[in-house]
Amino acid sequence: MKLKRSLEEAVCILLILAKEEGDNAVKSYWISQQLGVSDSYLKNDIT
């Protein structure tokens, strides 16, 4: 089964957020760096 890239990215984002301890905010630019995508793409993709 082939997954869409956006679904794969969403799962990765959920894993990043789940791994974060405490009430620390995770910045979108940090997530975009981890995924290797631009920050503007990430913001457009999740809205």
Image: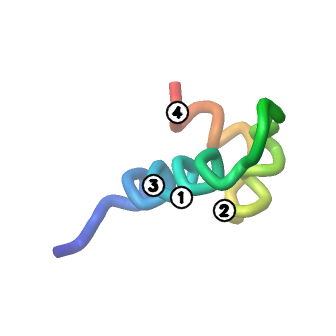
Whole-angstrom CA distance, mark 3 to mark 1, is: 4 Å
Amino acid type indicated by mark 2:
Leu
Above or below — where is 29 with respect to 9? above
Name the residue that disc number 4 marks: 46
Evaluate if marks 2 and 1 touch, with contact meaning CB atoms under 8 Å apart.
yes
Point 53% across, 58% down: residue: 12
Q: Disc number at residue 12?
A: 1
Name the residue that disc number 2 marks: 35
Evaluate if marks 3 and 1 touch, with contact meaning CB atoms under 8 Å apart.
yes
Outermost residue toward the left in this view? 1
Please tell me which of labels 2 and 1 falls first in the chain.
Answer: 1
Amino acid type indicated by mark 4:
Ile
Horizontal side, residue 25 vs residue 1: left or right: right
Locate residue 39: give its quadrant: top right
The local secondary structure at tag 2 comes to helix
Whole-angstrom CA distance, mark 4 to mark 2, is: 13 Å
Q: Position of residue 26 (x, y in %)?
A: 78, 39
Callout 3: 10 Å neighbours few (<14), some, many (20+)?
few
Whole-angstrom CA distance, mark 2 to mark 3, is: 11 Å
Point 66% across, 55% down: residue: 19
Q: Quadrant of the N terminus?
A: bottom left
Please tell me which of labels 4 and 2 falls first in the chain.
Answer: 2
Horizontal side, residue 42 vs residue 27: left or right: left
Callout 4: 10 Å neighbours few (<14), some, many (20+)?
few
Please tell me which of labels 3 and 4 falls first in the chain.
Answer: 3
Amino acid type indicated by mark 3:
Val
Q: Disc number at residue 11?
A: 3
Callout 2: 10 Å neighbours few (<14), some, many (20+)?
some
